[in-house]
Image (cartoon, rainbow, N blue to C red):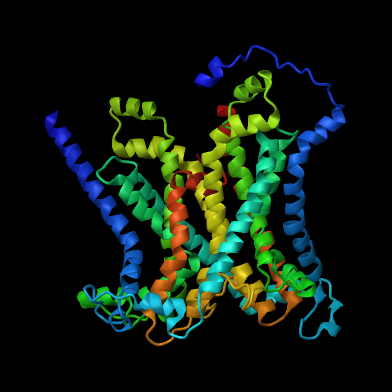
């Protein structure tokens, strides 16, 4: 008996080691990107790779525009505006909708829910041209607020689905009890529903933020010099420009940081959001 | 649970206020839903209708005066054009390869993470990280930092073992794009499958083990059937996202070397070639393709959803 337990334990430890190895292999490109971003351009472009080269902030200085290249700040500001504003609009539209689909469900509420989901499955390219022509004719081209509207529509179905599933977790009996005790609707929402649903709402907001921040196709087609977002700024690095690895790594890392932060903050609810609430 | 038992559920809700008419009440419940619904219809459905209309016109943006109705000519042209047919094929190849590879890897990782071991939380975090890199940044990372034939990390590591120094992107362009996408999407699959593994009936597994079932038998006859719908869900959601992939193709190969997929081709045909009619026809074809996937996806989501609602 003790012999088999030992064997099982050995096997468990072995598989734990395999898991660790897999984790390191998957993380290696990111770790290497981080290390390279702190190397000088000469040390970044060596073969074999120089793991122990001296560290410097030159890549970051270069990225933030000290080298005379375009400054990333306007694009970063645009991305912040587009992501935050669209997330705010998503919450404003999705919260009442989710309420009408869970706590006081309308008739045929599942059909409505599935309509929202089906819009998410319509490929972006299918509507791209009319949106582009519309923007061109109304002077909305290269305007960050056009992206805000589009990102709102991109994330609204996800948010409605997620929040519906979070609000459905609020027991109806508590709400009824509060109403019986004479609480009015705003009080019920603020004192009873909000505390239970708030972590879910926060996770929804973080996931919407990530999707808006990452978006490239709309931004690439619909913005130019004024409303360019951070991912569009990154496309400037597609063609090599001599020794520029440290700068590329610094840029990629800085622009990915908000997503990494938001993603880890929402880690527990990430699956539920990405699977549109189908998996808990 | 405690809340439900302490709440006075038996007492019927007392309404002292005057009852509004039924129609007004119906609108009051529907009201909160309307802004979101109207917004979604306006922003996502109307453009598609416009695309459908444009797809029946011969319309090059550089010659706006020559615009005229051509019926299904654009579709004929799209379906017989060698480049476009190639891009349909590329899209299928790219999607199937990435989804299958990341599902298999994701399943292996989920099974590893489902066990208790030292530092499980840290490993989970390490594994999720690739999914949380901005897609363009991830594509740049693979293109310049890993694949570069002279000083990329891959060839740098190969150098240590005296291996060859291939030019990854020129020799295997589609595989290069696929590898970067598999790296980003494996964590997604892993998360969904891990959630599936953790929702298994532990008592049933214990019972099977007591009855002398081996690990493999438990996996084959209990775990895998339970995971089936999670595998389907991962595959379908992955397909929906990867069919639409633009970032990786645009960044790593710029659609060259036979890697142009449909989204890239549509982008190129109106953004660079200004062929509005052709681009729209291709767009409509992408939609028809996605509807097939979407129908299955909706069915799986709805079966999982009904189960959840039934359980609640």
Tell me: residue A143, above or below residue B221: below
- Pick the residue in front: B234 or A278: A278
Q: Residue at x 64, y 22 (%)?
A: A178
Q: Is residue A87 left or right of residue A247?
A: right
Tell me: residue A103, above or below residue A41: above
Task: Give residue A115's position: percent from left, percent from top.
Answer: 70, 46
The residue furthest bottom is: A242
Which image quarter: residue B269? bottom right
| Residue B82 in view in this figure | yes
Q: Residue at x 39, y 75 (%)?
A: A60
Task: Give residue B212's position: percent from left, percent from top.
Answer: 28, 28
Q: Residue at x 67, y 47 (%)?
A: A92
- Pick the residue in front: A117 or B129: B129
| Residue B239 in view in this figure | no
Tell me: residue A191, above or below residue B56: above
Which image quarter: residue B155? bottom left
Task: Give residue A27's position: percent from left, percent from top.
Answer: 33, 60
Task: Give residue A67's position: percent from left, percent from top.
Answer: 43, 84
- Pick the residue in front: B220 or A120: A120
The residue furthest left is: A3
Q: Is residue A234 left or right of residue A253?
A: right
Q: Is residue A44 left or right of residue B79?
A: left
Quarter of the rendering occupied by the C terminus of chain B? top right
Number of marks in the image? 0
Q: Residue at x 67, y 37 (%)?
A: A99
């Amino acid at each position: 008996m003790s012999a088999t337990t030992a064997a099982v334990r050995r096997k468990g430890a072995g598989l734990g080691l395999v898991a660790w190895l897999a984790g390191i292999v998957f993380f290696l490109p990111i770790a290497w990107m981080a290390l390279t971003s702190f190397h000088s351009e000469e040390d970044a472009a060596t073969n074999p790779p120089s793991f122990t080269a001296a560290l410097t902030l030159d890549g970051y200085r270069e990225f933030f525009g000290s080298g005379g290249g375009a400054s990333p700040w306007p694009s970063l500001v645009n991305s912040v505006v587009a992501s935050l504003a669209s997330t705010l609009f998503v919450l404003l539209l999705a919260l009442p909708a989710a309420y009408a689909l869970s706590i006081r469900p309308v008739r045929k509420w599942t059909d409505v829910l599935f309509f929202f989901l089906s819009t998410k499955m319509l490929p972006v390219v299918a509507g791209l041209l009319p949106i582009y022509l519309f923007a061109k004719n109304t002077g909305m081209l290269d305007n960050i607020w056009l992206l805000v509207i589009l990102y709102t529509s991109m994330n609204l179905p996800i948010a409605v689905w997620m929040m519906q599933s979070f609000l459905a977790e609020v027991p109806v009996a508590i709400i009824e009890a509060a109403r019986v005790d004479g609480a009015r609707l705003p009080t019920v929402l603020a004192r009873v529903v909000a505390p239970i649903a708030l972590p879910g709402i926060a996770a929804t907001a973080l996931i919407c933020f990530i999707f808006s921040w990452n978006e490239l196709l709309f931004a690439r087609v619909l913005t130019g010099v004024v409303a360019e977002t951070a991912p569009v700024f990154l496309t400037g690095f597609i063609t090599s420009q001599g020794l520029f690895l440290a700068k590329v790594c610094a840029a990629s890392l800085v622009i990915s940081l908000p997503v990494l932060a938001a993603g880890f903050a929402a880690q527990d609810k990430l699956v539920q959001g990405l699977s549109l609430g189908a998996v808990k | 649970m405690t809340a439900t038992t302490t709440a006075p559920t038996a007492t019927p809700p007392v309404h002292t206020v005057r009852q509004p008419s039924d129609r007004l009440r119906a609108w009051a419940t529907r009201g909160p839903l309307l802004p979101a619904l109207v917004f979604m219809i306006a922003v996502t459905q109307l453009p598609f209708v416009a695309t459908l209309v444009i797809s029946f016109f011969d319309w090059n943006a550089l010659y706006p005066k020559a615009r005229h109705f051509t019926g299904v000519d654009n579709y004929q042209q799209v379906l017989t054009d060698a480049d476009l047919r190639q891009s349909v094929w590329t899209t299928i190849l790219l999607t199937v390869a990435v989804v299958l590879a990341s599902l298999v890897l994701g399943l292996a990782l989920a099974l590893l993470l489902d066990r208790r071991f030292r530092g499980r939380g840290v490993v989970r975090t390490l594994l999720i990280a690739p999914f949380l890199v901005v897609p363009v940044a991830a594509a740049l990372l693979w293109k310049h930092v890993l694949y570069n034939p002279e000083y990329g990390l891959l060839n740098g590591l190969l150098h240590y073992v005296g291996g060859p120094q291939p030019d990854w992107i020129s020799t295997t362009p589609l595989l290069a794009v696929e590898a970067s996408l598999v790296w980003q999407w494996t964590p997604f699959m892993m998360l969904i499958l891990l959630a599936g593994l953790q929702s298994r009936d532990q008592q049933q597994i214990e019972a099977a083990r007591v009855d002398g079932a081996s690990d493999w038998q438990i996996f084959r006859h209990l775990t895998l059937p339970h995971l089936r719908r999670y595998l389907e869900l991962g595959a379908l959601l992955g397909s929906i996202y990867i069919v639409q992939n633009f970032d990786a193709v645009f960044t790593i190969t710029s659609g060259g070397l036979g890697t142009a997929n449909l989204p890239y081709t549509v982008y190129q045909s109106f953004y660079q070639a200004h062929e509005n009619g052709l681009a729209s026809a291709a767009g409509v074809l992408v939609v028809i393709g996605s509807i097939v996937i979407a129908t299955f996806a909706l069915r799986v989501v709805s079966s999982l959803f009904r189960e959840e609602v039934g359980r609640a």
